Amino acid sequence: MILCRFEDGGKASLRHVTVTGIVLNQKRQIILVKRAKHLINPGKYALPGGFLDRDETTTKCILRETLEETGYTARIVSLFRINDNPNRPKEDRQNVDFVYILDSLDKKQKEDTESTDVSWFDLNAIPDEENMAFDHRETIVLYQKHLKSPFSLPYMR
């Protein structure tokens, strides 16, 4: 939660805005990053993503976060999901998450210090729940369901 002070002196705890990417390659594999020790959920696999910066759109944010955490440039395919569940598991704060489907393009740089490993996984061979951060495995499973039986996007919980 973010503690904010308003012009009238009032205070409120507000939710963070985050973005997450379902980044796929031409083989339709999904990229996952292993979270560094200094982050929440250390050593767990996650979809690339992060916090929205001031004066940044969610689309610019997911492209930036994907490049920073994986080293890959990407192209947005569509908005997949807006996850505003106030009880998201494995969180240290309450976030509203915009989840995008992206196609990976070129490897342009080394991943940043938030990722200790960047790996491609077959969609049917992702890590188990115990080895995944946040509710990212749930998002991947929902995406798998969408591939088998498409539903309208963005998915709203």
Image (cartoon, rainbow, N blue to C red):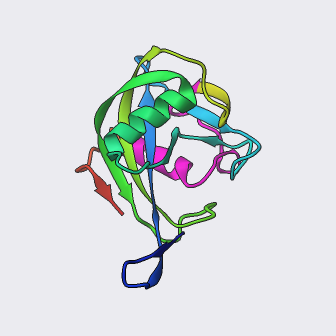
Q: Is residue 54 magenta?
A: no
Q: Is residue 148 visible?
A: no
Give the residue at the far right of this rendering.
37
Q: Nearer the viewer, residue 150 or 29?
A: 29
Q: Is residue 40 visible?
A: yes
- From what the image shows, is residue 45 above or below residue 154? above
Residue 23 location (% of width, % of height): 44, 31
Residue 83 location (% of width, % of height): 41, 59
Identity of the residue drawn at 46% across and 67% down: 15
In the visual, does 113 lie left or right of 147? Answer: right
How many marks on residues? 0
In the visual, does 122 lie left or right of 143? Answer: right
Identity of the residue drawn at 77% across and 43% down: 37
Identity of the residue drawn at 64% across and 60% down: 90
Q: Nearer the viewer, residue 15 or 99?
A: 15
Q: Nearer the viewer, residue 16 or 26?
A: 16
Residue 120 location (% of width, % of height): 56, 24
The C terminus, quarter of image: bottom left
The boundaries of the magenta stretch are 120-144
Q: Is residue 127 magenta?
A: yes
In the visual, does 70 lie left or right of 98? Answer: right
Identity of the residue drawn at 72% across and 39% down: 36
- From what the image shows, is residue 78 above or below residue 12? above
Identify the image quadrant of residue 85: bottom left
The N terminus, quarter of image: bottom right
In the visual, does 43 lie left or right of 32? Answer: right
Give the residue at the far left of this rendering.
152
